[in-house]
């Protein structure tokens, strides 16, 4: 009887590869009693198989057994067993119409694969195209809001995306679903594609080859764009393309062409607690900067512009300086390369660098985001009375948004300060703010104002997602509403009764049409205003998602963006680690 499989997982190599190019030569061993290489054909289809017999012998006890033995007094009674196992691992390569499929078996089957030559989205795109969005069993996604949230969903029976509750702000990373044409077949897609068959109709060699041909065709389809809008529109690039983009990046730095390049820590970090240094010397002085600025690379001799290349760029680090500990934190650092946010157009294609990873922007995605920013998003001026406010705090050698918020409220009798308020949502902790400023003028919707310094994609993403987060709960959470009203009532603001009359007591009476959401970006007046068109692409996307949720779903009267010039002091101090 012919052998059949109930399950197998495939990777697909990028075009132009062959059996040899996707194998890591350093991990390849010569044939021996424990390592075999075989080449054969399946109905004229070339195949190559690597198989290794691995033996594991661990004479030491597992930790849990040592834990038990600690309480066994008599040494002869202590328990000890050697852990011993012998099992094969394998890697199967199949060439179907000049496309290389790779299937690994066992714990070491994948160690021979050159992962950089494999398609990182083969599994999920193929599964989306072949399964559709009606028979999902499991999904994994992430959402980038106040924090990155990883979400696993699994329902008791196959369901559609609506039942799974996927939102447009989630990035889909994995699906498991029934095949549209055969409910006994399940596909699981991420970087690789797993096919599982239940019942008697298992996978023969003939079916395996037929599926392989179908997988290539379905991977190249773009049906998924219509049925899975949650799927990321940023595609991985080849190693060769990333190297080409790195060279272009270095050249732009050397040319001091910083139009679409800036520095930002690749995670949200509280700027009231930390400054930054480009060094961590034990004895020599370290220069401390209140914020990162791309101009520092040359002006402060961070990089040697006379001898700069990709390797030197990637070997440089940025360190956090703790104001509380008064020292550079050697353990909290980032590669300078991962702090560079860049957007580069190359050969009529658009690429972004974020977190040290280059990605190609899908053309339709790029068009939809830029058209929203250019044609839908309103940029609203703020009165000159509130321009050029000094936000520096010399005693802390920092520039703080809270300084702007406080001075704005001092100057504007219609503004109520919520920055630094500690409010509760539901049964959570009292650590929420609602907004930075609430402004109300009789006869108009009240302005819910969120303020953030211009400082790269992470900072702006935080501003936009924070606004969406708080404004959604404002319309739905009774505890939050009560906390907001309590904060107003406990103040000595001369117009608090007017604010309380506008912020209704009953949740059902609080509606989006009575409020406008203002997103204010503070920028250094000495550098000129950033334009909305030149915001980082992912910040634009987050802004688009915020707008569509608050304006189209929650019916807030208006969502607008404002750029406000402020006075920023570039604090620089010198600290030697031996001084701390």
Image (cartoon, rainbow, N blue to C red):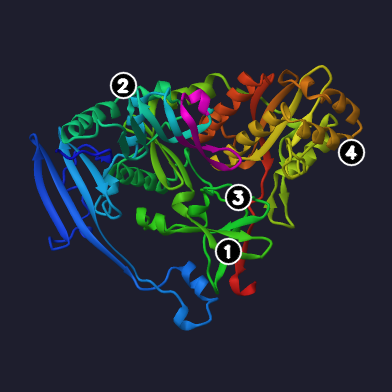
Q: Nearer the viewer, residue 257 or 122?
A: 122
Residue at position x 51%, y 33% in the image: 170
Q: Nearer the viewer, residue 10 or 444?
A: 10
Q: Residue beneath label 4, please? A: 490
Q: CA distance from mark 2 to mark 4?
A: 63 Å
| View extreme (bottom): residue | 75
| Residue 326 inside the magenta-drawn segment | no
Q: Residue beneath label 3, please? A: 269
SS label for mark 1: strand
Q: Nearer the viewer, mark 2 or mark 4?
A: 2
Q: Which residues are magenta?
A: 139-164
Q: Nearer the viewer, mark 3 or mark 4?
A: 4
SS label for mark 3: loop
Residue at position x 38%, y 26% in the image: 363
| Residue 153 inside the magenta-drawn segment | yes
Estimate how packed mark 1 is, as few (under 14), some (14 to 19) or many (20 or more) residues with alpha carbons within 10 Å. some
Estimate how packed mark 2 is, as few (under 14), some (14 to 19) or many (20 or more) residues with alpha carbons within 10 Å. few
Q: Nearer the viewer, mark 3 or mark 2?
A: 2
Q: Nearer the viewer, mark 1 or mark 2?
A: 2
Q: CA distance from mark 3 to mark 4?
A: 31 Å
Q: Residue beneath label 2, please? A: 181
Q: Are marks 2 and 4 in contact (CB under 8 Å)?
A: no
């Amino acid at each position: 009887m012919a052998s059949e499989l109930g399950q197998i997982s495939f990777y697909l190599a990028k075009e132009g590869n062959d059996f040899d190019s996707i194998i890591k030569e350093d991990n390849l061993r010569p044939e021996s009693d424990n390592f075999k290489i075989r080449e054969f054909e399946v109905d004229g289809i070339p195949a190559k198989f690597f198989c290794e017999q691995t033996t594991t012998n661990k004479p030491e006890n597992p930790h849990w057994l040592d834990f038990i033995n600690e309480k066994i007094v008599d040494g002869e009674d202590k328990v000890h067993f050697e852990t011993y196992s012998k099992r094969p691992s394998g890697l199967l390569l199949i060439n179907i119409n000049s496309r290389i499929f790779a299937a690994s078996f066992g714990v070491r089957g994948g160690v021979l694969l050159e992962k950089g030559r494999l398609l990182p989205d083969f599994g999920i795109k193929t599964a989306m195209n072949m399964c559709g969005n009606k028979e999902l069993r499991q999904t994994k996604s992430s959402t980038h809001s106040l924090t990155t949230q990883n979400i696993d969903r699994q329902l008791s029976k196959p369901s559609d995306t609506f039942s799974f509750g996927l939102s447009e702000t989630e990035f889909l990373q994995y699906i498991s679903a029934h095949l549209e044409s055969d409910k006994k077949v399940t596909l699981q897609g991420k970087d690789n594609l797993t096919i599982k068959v239940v019942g008697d109709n298992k996978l023969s060699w003939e079916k395996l080859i037929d599926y392989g041909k179908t997988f290539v065709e379905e991977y190249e389809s773009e049906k998924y764009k219509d049925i899975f809008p949650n799927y990321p529109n940023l595609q991985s690039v080849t190693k060769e393309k990333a190297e080409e983009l790195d060279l272009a990046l270095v050249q732009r730095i050397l040319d001091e062409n910083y139009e679409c390049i800036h520095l930002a820590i690749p995670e949200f970090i509280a700027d009231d607690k930390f400054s930054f240094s480009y060094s961590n010397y034990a004895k020599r002085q370290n220069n401390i900067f209140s914020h990162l600025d791309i101009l520092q690379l040359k002006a402060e001799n961070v990089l040697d512009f006379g001898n700069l290349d990709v390797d030197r760029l990637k070997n440089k680090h940025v360190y956090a300086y703790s104001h509380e500990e008064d020292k550079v934190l050697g353990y909290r650092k980032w590669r300078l390369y991962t702090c560079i946010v860049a957007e580069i157009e190359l050969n009529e294609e658009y690429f972004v660098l974020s977190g040290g990873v280059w990605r190609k922007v899908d053309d339709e995605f790029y068009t939809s985001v830029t058209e929203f920013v250019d044609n839908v998003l309103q940029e609203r001026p703020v009165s000159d009375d509130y321009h050029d406010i000094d936000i520096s705090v010399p005693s802390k050698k920092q520039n703080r948004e809270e300084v702007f918020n406080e001075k704005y409220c001092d100057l504007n009798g219609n503004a109520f300060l919520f920055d630094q308020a500690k409010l509760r949502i539901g049964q959570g902790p009292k650590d929420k703010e609602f907004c930075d400023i609430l402004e109300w003028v009789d006869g108009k919707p009240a302005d819910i104002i969120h303020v953030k310094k211009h400082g790269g994609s992470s900072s702006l993403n935080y501003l936009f997602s924070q606004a969406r987060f708080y404004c959604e709960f404002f319309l739905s959470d009774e505890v939050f509403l009560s906390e907001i009203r309590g904060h107003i009532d406990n103040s000595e603001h001369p117009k608090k009764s007017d604010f309380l009359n506008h912020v209704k007591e009953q949740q059902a009476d609080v509606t989006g049409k009575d409020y406008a959401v203002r997103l204010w970006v503070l920028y250094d007046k000495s550098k000129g205003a950033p334009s909305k068109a030149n915001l980082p692409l992912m910040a634009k996307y987050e802004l688009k998602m915020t707008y569509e949720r608050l304006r189209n779903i929650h019916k807030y009267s208006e969502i607008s963006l404002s750029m406000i010039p402020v006075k920023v002091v570039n604090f620089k101090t010198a600290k030697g680690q031996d001084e701390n």
